[in-house]
Image (tube, grey):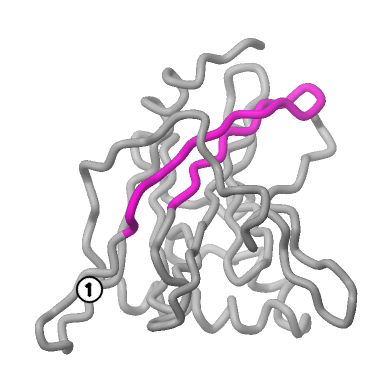
């Protein structure tokens, strides 16, 4: 199926929430600078990634931060929505996220490095959380997700933002290259291709 980028952006543009640091003087909303969107084809699927950009990752570090929210589409249907909180790819549709209009992701960007999370229905067994409990690399994301869901009242909705089409992080950025630990390149992907693609 052939998709037009502008149509997909208009249809699937996520509803976004960022943290409001009310206790700071003056209070500060941790809003992103801008948003890019890039579409690619993988097998039988189309992937649309929205890239949210901040001028910092963790407070005061001065490192530009790009956070992806990826829709996986097949035959006019969204088959998954994926984010990458703290370098962990999370597939959300299996966890029954709450979606705006039944299709648009509702994303909360954590106050801890802007990790993107979707809100799930109350009493849902969150599969990625259940499966991640014993994995060291996902423990930070688990605690962060629980804190974000608990503090949703501290977040504000950024409603009117423009999306720059055909834009993603530079190939030299950490968002695209991942990180290197002990000479091994890790976390260079921001999505996983479903087997059905």
Query: Which residues, given as a range, are shown in magenta?
Result: 32-52
Residue 31 image-quadrant placement: bottom left
The residue positioned 77% from the left and 41% from the top of the image is: 193
Chief secondary structure of the magenta portion: strand
Residue 47, percent from left and from top: 64, 33
Residue tagged 1? 20
Residue 19 image-quadrant placement: bottom left
Give the side of residue 87 with respect to residue 58, left or right: right
Residue 135, percent from left and from top: 77, 80
Quarter of the image with the N terminus in it: top right
Quarter of the image with the C terminus in it: top right
Give the side of residue 103 with respect to residue 195, left or right: left
The residue positioned 62% from the left and 10% from the top of the image is: 2
**Foreground residue, 103 or 162?**
162
Residue 158, percent from left and from top: 24, 52
The residue positioned 68% from the left and 77% from the top of the image is: 138
Would you place residue 156 above or below residue 45 in this image? below
Residue 132 image-quadrant placement: bottom right
**Foreground residue, 20 or 138?**
20
The residue positioned 75% from the left and 58% from the top of the image is: 188
Packing grade of label 1 (10 A; few <14, some 14-19, many >=20) is: some
Magenta stretch: includes residue 10: no
Q: Secondary structure at mark 1?
A: strand
**Foreground residue, 68 or 117?**
68
The outermost residue toward the left is 26
Q: How many marks?
A: 1
């Amino acid at each position: 199926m052939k998709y037009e980028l502008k149509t997909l952006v208009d249809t699937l543009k996520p509803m976004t929430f960022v943290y409001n640091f009310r206790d700071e003087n003056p209070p500060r909303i941790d809003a992103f600078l801008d948003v890019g969107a890039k579409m690619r084809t993988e097998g039988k699927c189309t992937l649309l990634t929205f890239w949210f950009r901040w001028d910092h990752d963790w407070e005061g570090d001065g490192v530009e931060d790009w956070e992806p929210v990826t829709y996986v589409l097949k035959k006019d249907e969204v088959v998954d929505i994926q984010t990458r909180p703290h370098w962990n790819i999370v597939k959300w549709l299996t966890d029954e996220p709450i979606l705006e209009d039944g299709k648009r992701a509702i994303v909360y960007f954590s106050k801890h490095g802007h990790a993107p999370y979707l809100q799930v229905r109350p009493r849902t067994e969150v599969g990625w959380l259940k499966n991640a409990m014993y994995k060291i690399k996902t423990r930070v994301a688990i605690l962060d997700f629980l804190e974000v869901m608990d503090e949703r009242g501290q977040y504000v909705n950024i409603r009117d933002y423009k999306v720059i089409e055909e834009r993603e992080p530079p190939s030299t950025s950490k968002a695209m290259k991942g990180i290197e630990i002990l000479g091994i390149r890790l976390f260079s992907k921001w999505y996983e291709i479903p087997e059905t693609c």
